[in-house]
Amino acid sequence: MRIADVLPLTPLQQGLLFHAITAQADRDDVYAVQLNITLSGPLDSDRLGDAVQAVVARHPNLVARFSQKFAEPMQIIPADPVAPWQYVDLTGDTDNLDAQIDRVCIAERSAVCDLAEGPAFRAALIRTAPDQHLLVMTNHHIVLDGWSLPILLGEVFATYYGQRLPPAVPYRRFVSWLSGRDLDAARGAWREVLAGFETPTLVGPAGHEGEGRREVASFTLSERATGALGELARTCHTTVSTVLQGAFAQLLMAMTGQRDVVFGTTVSGRPAEVFGADSMVGLLINTVPVRANVTADTTTADLLEQLQNSYSRTLDHQHFALNEIHRVAGQDHLFDTFFVYENYPIDAAELSGADGLAVTEFAHREYNHYPLAIQALPGNELRLRVEFDTEVFAAADINTLIGRFERLLVAMTTDPARPLSSIDVLDSVEHDRIDAWSNRAVLTRSPSATLSIPALFAEQVARAPYASAMT
């Protein structure tokens, strides 16, 4: 392979590489991301393949190799970037169509996980019926973030339709910007935000490595409830994302019995001072902690102001590596839960063409290694996707959490001046369970048993219900 460039890894890339190296060989790497795009109408498969290759040539970092042969891990950018591409015609096997599609998708995900030898991005086109295709784009998260997806897809289909594109913004520009950051200033900012934080916020059992099977539960807020969130954000001079973070923080307080909690979130990592960052394709995001610390008198408005102030104080330092943030906080781990507000919608209509080709459906497969994560997807009706580790949570536990989250949002939007300590996150059934458990002399749980949220709540909070735990 001829080499065009050698770049250091971003902080998140370092973490993803470590995770890929230590992941169990017999399991899918959870950071193998897949986007399936259903295409209806006449399609020139060769022209689409050429369009994918042309876009990869514009962004060669998509097919970087990752080497540990240097003093620090590096990403090797090839001079002749090529993304593996295959065309699969399944129109003759309609009886086993779904199984055959799954077979292709599984093989594609496995292939992108060889970060040292193989490209971390590849594509396949599956013909499923006359004038019906499935474009499968697969990447390891280490080379591509969600904010890049609309840009990448827009370029692929623009190239397919014969449109000219402006010069690509090189990924090196962002990596070079990172190398010039003031790390001492970043340490100081994060040290200030996390001062006095003593107990990590963990919902999974000690030593759990996050390798359990992942499952997803989804729920949708009504248009009215979604509007109420927006109104609360405007009233408190903040964002809907911050409002949802406030609700998630309270959910963690109820789960753990702690009034000072931290969870992770994703920041876009596209600084305004990096020219062209908004059109760059690659991994620019970072994971940083969010802290919420409340008292018995803290109101919804108080909490949102606190979260907004913390965000503002660390805005210029969101590039800082999470392991370094752990170090300045004096903790080995700060959290094992995650919340993200994903405001990068993909518009199918913009990708469809005048020649009859239409993008009719998207299916996005993306996970992380945290036991519990909530992804918010904006719209007239806010959609929330709850991802969980089945070795930590049962489906019934997640249903319980969803109910609590919805009750918290209603309480927050109904009366922002109401003390958080007066919000009851439990329904009547849970109150009956808490009463029963609190009367037991000894509470036990096998360390190897599936963790139950009602049981966890009973052990950690029943002895001091949510209201009294915050006094």
Image (cartoon, rainbow, N blue to C red):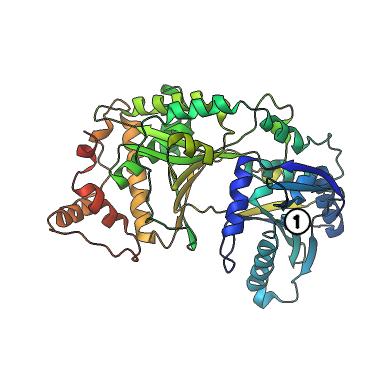
285 over 272 or under it: above or below: below
Image location of residue 368, percent across then percent down: 53, 52
The kind of residue on which mark 1 rests is Pro
> Which residue, as the protein is rendered here, is positioned at the far front?
71
Kindly identify the residue that appears in the image at 67 percent across and 53 percent down.
360
Kindly identify the residue that appears in the image at 61 percent across and 58 percent down.
21
Q: Quadrant of residue 148?
A: top right
Kindly identify the residue that appears in the image at 41 percent across and 22 percent down.
235
Crowd band around label 1 with a 10 angstrom C-alpha radius: few (<14), some (14–19), many (20+)? many
Give the secondary structure at mark 1.
loop
Is residue 345 found left or right of 201 in the rendered image?
right
Is residue 318 found left or right of 58 in the rendered image?
left
In which quadrant is the N terminus drawn? Answer: bottom right
Viewer can see residue 171: yes
Is residue 132 found left or right of 413 in the rendered image?
right
Viewer can see residue 156: no
Q: Nearer the viewer, residue 382 or 190?
A: 190
Q: Quadrant of residue 316?
A: top right
Image location of residue 266, percent across then percent down: 54, 40
User: What residue did someone put label 1 on?
Assistant: 119
Kindly identify the residue that appears in the image at 20 percent across and 56 percent down.
433
In which quadrant is the C terminus drawn? Answer: top left
Q: Quadrant of residue 110?
A: bottom right
